[in-house]
Image: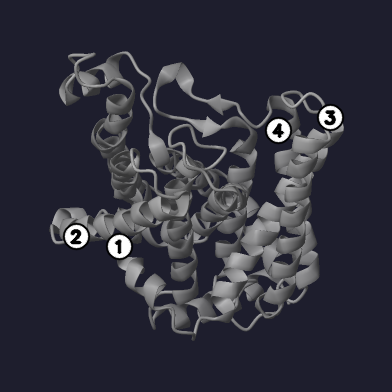
Amino acid sequence: MGSNEMLRKADGSDRTVKARGRIVALDRARTFITLLVLIHHSVVNYTHFGTGDRMRWLGFDLVVLFNDSFFMACMFLISGLFVHDSLARRGASNYLQNRAWRLGVPFLVSIFVLMPIAYYPTFLRYHLPGTTDFNFFHFWWRTLTVGPWPSGPAWFLWVLLAFDIVAAILLALAPRMLKILGLLIFSLRDRPWTAFVAFLVFSVAVYVPMRLIVGDMSWLEPDGFPLPIQTSRILLYAGNFLTGVGIGVVGLRAGILSEEGALTRRWPRWLGFASLFYGAILLMVYAHHNWIADFDSPPLSWQTGYSLAFALFSAAMTFTVLTVSLAFTSSNMKLLDAMRPSAYGIFLTHYIFIIWLQYAVYDYSCPAVVKFAVVFAGTLALSWAVTWLLRKIPVVARMI
């Protein structure tokens, strides 16, 4: 089958199914990652990674390690899936205007309004009343003028907008390159093991060298502006996004992510490999804590091993999330389906409630699990309710 014939066949199938509505499986995958973000931010304060509450639980460390090792890379791939179709339908100018509205404006609202509100409890905790004359407006102005000026979870928005701009430029300047990428990925539709191994190798190639060069703690944040990105993961995120764009070039329903395709049918295998690679991450962490003399400067062998385990798990878990969502499209998932229309708004607003609720339960001596339950349930309910109210405003509803 020639490349043009493959494109016509795939595009025609995709248009037929699109007419029947949204792609439920991909909506659920995106909403699932949003739910993991809430869980992640709800538990991190009660782990070794946290710096606040004295109540800790080792199980939460495993949750944070699990999430952090894959979920944002997966989210970038999912975001890339819809780029080509949107660009082809809207044109580059209208597409970028839409992305600026949907990503740029919420990012600005986040860094100028939402994040200062969210981080104010941290200021209150460490600058108790009577020791400072800073009220909220003083704190807000100092944040913007002196710093630090955090972006919180909104970093994802500016990075995604930058990737969208690059994709629009690539489609304008090198459309044939994207077409070749799409056809290459489409050719793996009936070769799931080749696709899986190729994605593992690709993830290792774009992550491991960067991790070994800059380490895992480096953040690129130009001149103190709230435009951060974790340096070691720049190419991993960009690579996943580009992979998503490539998948979407030929078609989502008819291509490698077909609900009845060979890739989807093998989801238990991808889950098994993801579990194996996560076990490798845990083994490397155990070795770091128990077998390495200099904890702060582990040898290159350990750094290489951990980087490999991280990249392999990230790739395998991304395959797992997508294929499980596709395999269970017809299943009843009430929470994810109910959350779907509000997922973006929940992502934008949740950090305020996370930090304020953590501040509210800080002085209580109840177990970390109880504090997490209060913070998570309260955050989900409040951010969902606020989003529901905001979506009653037509101009806001078109944004979130």
Label 1 to label 4: alpha-carbon separation:
35 Å
Residue tagged 1: 342
| Tag 1: amino acid | Ser
Instruction: Report the residue marked by disc 4.
Output: 210
Q: Please say if 141 is above or below 348.
A: above
* Left or right of 286 in this view: 20: left
Numbered circle sitting on residue 391: 2
**Which of marks 4 and 3 precedes in the sequence?**
4
What SS does tag 3 mark? helix
- Residue closest to the eye, 355 or 324: 355
Labelled pair 2, 1 in contact (Cβ < 8 Å): yes
Residue type (three-letter) at the residue carrying disc 4: Met
User: Where residue 340 sits: x, y (%)?
Assistant: 36, 67
Return the residue found at the far right: 301
Amino acid type of the residue that numbered disc 2 sits on in the rendered structure: Arg
10 Å neighbourhood of mark 2: few (<14), some, or many (≥20)?
Answer: some
Q: Which residue is mark 3?
A: 300
Q: Earlier in the sequence, mark 1 or mark 4?
A: 4
Q: Is residue 46 visible?
A: yes
Q: Residue at x 40, y 71 (%)?
A: 336
Q: CA distance from mark 3 to mark 4?
A: 13 Å
Which is more N-terminal, label 3 or label 1? 3
The mark nearer the N terminus, 3 or 2, is 3
Q: Amino acid at mark 3?
A: Leu
| Residue 34: quadrant of the picture | bottom left
In this view, the mark in front (3 or 4):
3
